[in-house]
Image (cartoon, coloured by chain):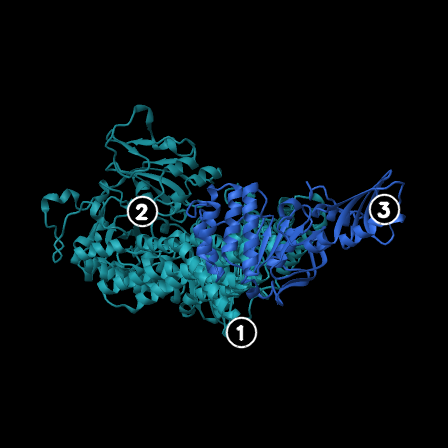
Amino acid sequence: MTSKKYSLKLSGFTFRKALRENWVFVLLGIAFVLISFGGAFDIIHASFNPIYAESLRKTFTYCFAQFYDAIPPETIMSIPFVFVSVVLAIRLFWYVMNKAAVNVHFSIALNRGTLFASRFLAGITIITMSIIIPWIFIVIANIAFFGFYGKMLLAALYIVIKLLSASYYVFAAVALVMQIVGSMLEAFVYSSVAILSPFMVNFTLSQFISTFIYGSPYTETLSDYDNEVLVFGKGLLNTNFTFVNFAGYLLPGASDNDVISLASERKELLYDPESFGMNLFGRPLVFLAVIAVISAAAYFCARRRKAEKAGFMGTSPLMQGFCVVVVGSFLAALFNHIVCGMDLPFRKMVIVSIIGGIVIMAVGYTVVELIVLRSFKRYRKRIKYLIAEIGIFLLVCLLMLSALPVGSVKIPDASDIKSADIVINGQEVYASNIYYGYSYGSFVRTKDKLRLDAQLMSKGERTLFEGFTDKADIDKIISVNGKLASLKNDSVSKFYGGENERSDKINAGVAIRYHLKDGKTAVRNYKYATLGILEEILSLTDSGNIRKQVSDYVKGLVENAEILSTFSYNLGLVSPSYSRAVAPAAFMNKQVRIDLVEALAADILAGTMPLSGSSDAQFIGYVFMAGSPLADIPVTEYDEETGEPLVTGDMGNIEIITEKTDIFENNVLAYPVYADMENTMSFLDSNGMTRFFESDDKAVKVVYCKYTEPTDVSRYENDTFTLWGESYSDRHFQYLWANQTEEELYYMMSGGEYASIDYAGPLSEEIDEKDRVEIEDIMPENAVTVTDPGELAKLQSAFRPRYSPIYDGYYAVMVLESGRVILGYIPESLTK
Amino acid sequence: MIEIKNVTKKFGDFTALNNLSMSVGDGSVYGLVGYNGAGKTTLLKIIAGVYKPDEGEVTINGRNTYTDSAARLDMFYVPDEIFFEAFSTIERMAKFYAGYYPSFSMETLDNLCNVFQLDKKARLNSFSKGMQRQAEMILGMSALPKVLLLDESFDGLDPQKRSIMNKMLVDYTAERECSVIISSHNLHEIADICDHMALINGKSIALDCSVDDISAHRCKFRLVFADDKSQADFEGLDIVRFKTDGKIVTLSVKGDPDTAEEKLRQMSPLLIERFPLTIEEIFLEEMEDTDYDFKEIFS
């Protein structure tokens, strides 16, 4: 037998032996996929219930129709498979770490490279089988039960490639590290760093680029922005479990809400739809290419592996250096991240970040070196590497500060720009994001809203305005861009600070994307803005183009609601003081409902409905859409033809739904109706619906005060989320103002009942005497109580329920004849 | 034929072997003796292809054992540090080695297990250290290699098992024309079975000789003369060691013992006694004027 044949025979034996010893991982993988993602239970369930099966089929079809467009490309990681890959690599390559094992394995008639390759291939085979076998089963089962869908195959292929590439990467990285280092401790630590290194490098780069290059596109405002430079690290370690749970995209029976919400969210980001399809498979393919390189490196290292390394620490200065640099830089970037949270002026932020980074790197380097070398003398000899590391860090920082790595951050010339887009913080800033907007927060002045959204709602929600092509608009955008760039070294306003601590500069987050005539795209991103700049952007976006987008979006909501049974948008009308709310869904047929929404959309398009949601025009009431069916709200059914109630004996419950339930605690979207909204008003008049806005419930008392500054951050943050739309409670106000107590407050109504201050209706339970308070008791000292009927009528017409104005206007509590207590806001403009 | 040519091996700044050369013939049982840390294991690992020599090469029948993996097909290395797979038995390890050694004989294994009374199906981690060594050597011999490298393999064996193992090795070597290199830090352990011995002193071979040759050409005489004698009186003899105690002379000579005795008798001693030299004595005499530390080797 020739040497080659012997080698083949021996490597075949090695391969088979490795498979035999690790077959349990194949079973683990199969079991994991089938149990967790297989949807097997859904299929079994459906097979016993044909009606359910049909419903599943629809869901299934929709999921796959959405899949290609909706799935986020960074979904790459599946923790269990990563875990399996790590354990598998350790099991297959532990012999190079063990002195006894290495003697035996390196003395057999198989060279080190072939031995490694045989075991490596066995590992790859095990991973592949554990992922592909269950997916083949799932796909076959789905096809057999639901029929053939091309998108399903595409989805399955994509998911399989994603899982495979993530698993291969981890396996190859651990294998490479094990071929380099000498001890298991090092193998574990360095493998962890190697696996996490794409994420850490990505974080480090994007963090420093975003903070050191003022105006660069890679800031956290666009953390979801899909940029090609950082594509590798970004995808690998996204351990967002919602995304990892890909059952929602592939399998019948899984919730399609995720798909829908993802699809809607993605539209708000700066993804380029045209390149999205390529990115879908592009990223895993990039991974596979990287894996090939890592595998080749591991093979090369295995061939050159020295047996004498086995069991010894510190045998790989290169690997040690790599890990120390990666982790050190990452920690320095983390420090920079914290420093940035302090909103220091740019120059101070840079100095603090660099000094802190150097200290962190030096400490990290010293600790690792002393652990590995266990000799201060040897550490001193190697101190030059620390100096080199810090030198490189400083050099990179300087490069970033001079904006060299990503080219110029200068503003393009107007003549080179084809079109421009703008992204700003906040869900409710503009009407385009109407899905979330137009709830209570819509009835305030734009300036208040801008500031609030920019500062409080910058929690990852963004609004995109795209397609500015007019020269005037582009010139204005360039002007705005220049102003944003000039804020670099200004002090930042402390939102929670007092008057003297506030500047015009606020932590807002604005991104501008220029589509250049040469086909390139330039993105500029700024962390800070001023109120004036934000108002300029608002005026810019109140254009026909944007209104068309918003209008289409509103119409699309109803269309989607009709298509997707899972979303039951229930239209309703509410009087300004909440005293009457009806659910016309019960008496309007589908066409009428669509017509109503189209009327709203027409007003948006025509500009009669302000995009900001604010208007000084007479406020008529709300058109609302309930995110969930109004099943919990007792309503009387109406005849669709006549609009008359079918059960007359139940009239007491027909319209006053708020007596039982505060509808605004039911995820309701409210659209304001102002008297000058011609299309909507015309539709409502012609259909006899304006009567639903009428209310005889007159105000008997209004207590109001100038809204004062919140001064206590912790208290404010305690209820931050209460400002995110409908769910905020009056406990929030309680924190902010005079009483500063956490006790529940109640108002004694004229009828002797007690109303909780965060509840719009009467309470049925008895309240202890000691808890009784009057409205005036919970208001600031400067609060004014109005009981004069003439004054009350004026205030009631200006009253906008439930919104915290923050800086302008008045906080107000209105007591109605019926005993209802409504908390709200009176815009300053309407008091003059 | 195993040839070690100018092998140098360094670990960092420490030189373990320096330009070391030696050769082991087919069918030879070669004893490699040296104190702990003398370089025996390093040399064996280089021969086995585990370590790459920094300079020089090791060949078996002309094939480099490090670069040409096929050269290791007929070579089995029994290392000092015992390796068994987790929860394995002799039977399982036999299957492991059978995959890598085409001539592995399960029949031989059975026979050897019977001789040493080892249970093939018992967990190896339940064995004593001595039993584990036996198991390892049994596995090595069952692979029927042409070259068997034993690193401190007799360490921990009781005298009875060592005796059996010695016999087995001698028979095995004779039957299969196999070369065996046995390393030990204790000459007693291997003196009986080696036909060739080398003394390694940390960087190089201090002594390399055939046991038969060296034994056949060495002997010790004790003589009593009527008058006092000095070494100068014994011209014509290749004296290695000379000691007088008045009229009593003790000396070791190189060369043919009969010829030496003939010459001594011509000096008319009152008494002449001839003794064969033990291998230990020969080694001692050979290394007398060197800095070699014999304390452990002859302990």
Q: Which amino acid does label 3 sit on?
A: Ser
At label 3, counting other C-alpha atoms closer than 10 Å, the crowd grade (few under 14, some 14-19, many 20 or more) is few
Say which mark, if any, is on residue A738: none
The image shows residue B278, relative to residue A179, as above or below, that is above
**Subunit that carries the residue with mark 3:** B
Q: What residue type is labelled 2?
A: Ser
Q: Report the Cα–Cα distance between label 1 and label 2.
A: 50 Å
Q: What residue type is labelled 1?
A: Ser
Name which quarter of the figure residue B24 lies in.
Answer: bottom right
Q: Is residue A280 left or right of residue A573?
A: right
- Say which residue appears at 25% left-offset and 53% top-offset: A41
The image shows residue A703, relative to residue A83, as above or below, that is above
Q: Report the Cα–Cα distance between label 1 and label 3.
A: 125 Å
Q: What residue is pinned by disc 1?
A: A415
N-term-proximal mark, 1 vs 2? 1
Residues flagged by tags 1 and 3 on a common chain: no
The image shows residue A649, relative to residue A14, as above or below, that is above
Name the one closer to the observer, B212 or A364. B212
